Amino acid sequence: MNIYVGNLPYETTDEDLAATFASYGQVTSARVIIDRFSGRSRGFGFVEMASDSEAKAAILALNGKDMKGRALTVNEAQPRAAGGGGPRGPRPPQPDRQQDRRW
């Protein structure tokens, strides 16, 4: 199960995140999301755990728990909403520019 972890301290690393969840079961992956321009943490990340029961136990135990002075938001990750990047709709008609041509 994939878990969303929000309100992370900005100095949190992938290893810190994995260690926080490891006491509740096998962590398959842990990733803190980094801003591509500044290189700083965006303050949230994702943890994947091997079994749903371990993940649910971790969510119950860690949601609201203090980590370096910040209360964590921990819940099941939601799939990304579709949208963006597609066609924007019809373009407005362009004026006929025949009179501007010189030939």
Image: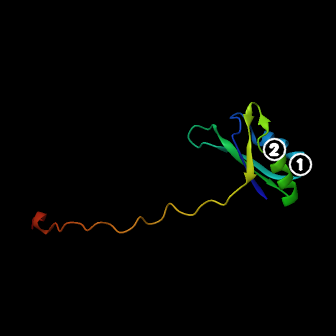
Viewer-proximal residue among 23 and 61: 61
- The answer to whether 80 appears left or right of 102 in the picture is right
Residue 29 visible, this angle: yes
Which residue is painted at 79% across and 52% down in the image? 29
Looking at the picture, does residue 60 appear above or below residue 84? above
Residue 13 x, y percent position in the rendering: 75, 39
Q: Disc number at residue 24?
A: 1
Which residue is painted at 79% across and 59% down in the image? 1
Q: Earlier in the sequence, mark 2 or mark 1?
A: 1
Residue 91 x, y percent position in the rendering: 32, 66
* Amino acid under disc 1: Tyr
* Amino acid under disc 2: Leu
Residue 51 visible, this angle: no
Where disc 2 sits, the SS reads helix
Q: Disc number at residue 62?
A: 2
Where disc 1 sits, the SS reads loop
Looking at the picture, does residue 63 appear above or below residue 77? above
- Within 10 angstroms of label 1, few (less than 14), some, or many (20 or more) residues? some
> Which image quarter: residue 90?
bottom left
Whether label 2 touches label 1, CB < 8 Å: yes
Quarter of the C terminus within the rendering: bottom left
Residue 55 x, y percent position in the rendering: 83, 54
Residue 71 x, y percent position in the rendering: 74, 37
